[in-house]
Amino acid sequence: MNIAAKIALAALITSSASGLVLAGGADLYVEKNCITCHGTNGNQPVMDAYPRIGGQSEMYLLAQMKDIKTGARNNSHTLAMKNVMGNVSDSEMATIAGWLSKQSQ
């Protein structure tokens, strides 16, 4: 296989994998009930006090989810979030964060 074919194959695999992560993130976002409070794309929260999370940095979102799950972040909304995050694995958090970061603000 020549170098151009290898590059094309690598790009195809990367874009396909990225598409799967984005689709998986949307599915997990609904399955894990994130949509209930944060809205369709993370920017239509049901209460003004809830954050708009769509379009935020992937690393920021992941850190916030992990901090809520471990109890490192503790504020008026974290009790409800802690219960939700208890059902989300680290890999699922990463997938959701990746998807959310691609949503428009």
Image (cartoon, helix red, strand yellow):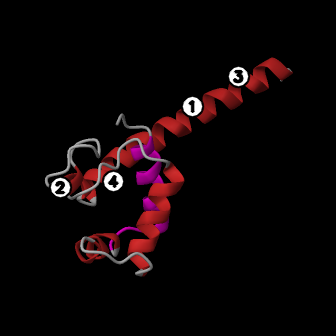
Determine the secondary structure under disc 4: helix
Q: Is residue 68 above or below residue 93?
A: below
Q: In this image, 51 relative to 20: left or right?
A: left
- Bounds of the magenta segment: 87-101
Q: Which residue is mark 2?
A: 36
Along the line of sight, the residue nearer the viewer: 76 or 54? 76
Q: Which mark is residue 8?
A: 3
Q: Position of residue 82 (x, y in %)?
A: 31, 75
- Dot 3 or dot 4: first in sequence order is 3
Q: Is residue 85 above or below residue 4?
A: below
- Dot 1 or dot 4: first in sequence order is 1
Determine the secondary structure under disc 1: helix
At label 2, the amino acid type is: Thr
Residue plotted at (36% across, 34% down): 104
Q: Which mark is residue 50?
A: none
At label 3, the amino acid type is: Ala
